[in-house]
Amino acid sequence: LIDQSHILQWISFADSEILPAACTWLFPCLGLMQYNKQSCEKAKEDVKKALKVLNDHLLTRTYLVGERITQADISVFCTLLSLYQHDLDPAFRQPYENVNGWFVTLMHQPQFKAVVGDIALCEKMAQFDAKKFGELQKKGKDVKEKGSKIKEEKPQKAKEEKKKEKP
């Protein structure tokens, strides 16, 4: 019962402490949202705080809860995955040896590899690309416009077909 509550605490930690900061930092780098320097810098600091908590916890442990992989490890790993792939370059990762060891241990587990495949750790921190952001925004608008046109055409075609069916 105590282990179950610890597992839930780590899942909650991933959802409330890591995920918001990870999204705020990562999404502009992927061109998914506009870059805001203050928000990204705060997000980096929040990620550092979360990694410090994890690093301290993993100082004397192999896994987050108990002696084997639990849902806590899976949830936190998945929440950190995109950061490790795109933003956490070697210099950023360096102070968090325990987290890095835990992450690498999990990513080499056959069960993890079967789901996420081979993972390449970030070598160079991703940066916001205004051109890429503009292109993705334009594509998004084009898709929305096409979707609206299709929605308008369908009712018209249905009405025309009904008229043809009536004698």
Image (spheres, grey):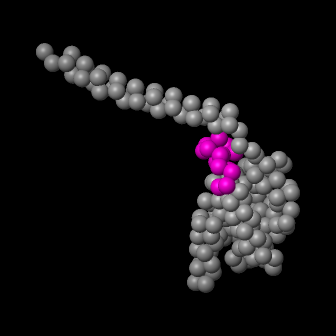
**Residue 93 within the segment the image draws in magenta:** no
Residue lying at 73% horizontally and 73% vertically, measured from the top left: 53
Q: Which residue is more in the foreground, 85 or 135?
A: 135
Q: On the picture, is 66 further left or further right than 99?
A: left
**Up-down relation of residue 129 to residue 16 (above or below):** above
Horizontal and vertical percent for residue 162?
Answer: 21, 22
Instruction: Name the residue at the bottom extreme.
Output: 2
User: Within the image, what quadrant is residue 140 found in?
Assistant: top right
Q: Which residue is more in the foreground, 137 or 90?
A: 137
Q: Which residue is more in the foreground, 46 or 100?
A: 46
Q: Quadrant of the C terminus?
A: top left
Residue lying at 51% horizontally and 28% vertically, measured from the top left: 142
Total tally of numbered discs in the picture: 0
Residue lying at 59% horizontally and 64% vertically, measured from the top left: 15
**Residue 33 within the segment the image draws in magenta:** yes
Q: On the picture, is 67 further left or further right than 31?
A: right
Instruction: Name the residue at the front extreme.
Output: 38
Residue lying at 58% horizontally and 84% vertically, measured from the top left: 1
Residue extent of the magenta highlight: 26-39
User: Within the image, what quadrant is residue 93 found in?
Assistant: bottom right
Please indicate, yes or no, whether residue 11 appears anywhere in the rendered image.
Answer: no
**Up-down relation of residue 9 to residue 33 (above or below):** below
User: Within the image, what quadrant is residue 47 found in?
Assistant: bottom right
Horizontal and vertical percent for residue 122?
Answer: 80, 50
Please indicate, yes or no, whether residue 129 appears anywhere in the rendered image.
Answer: yes
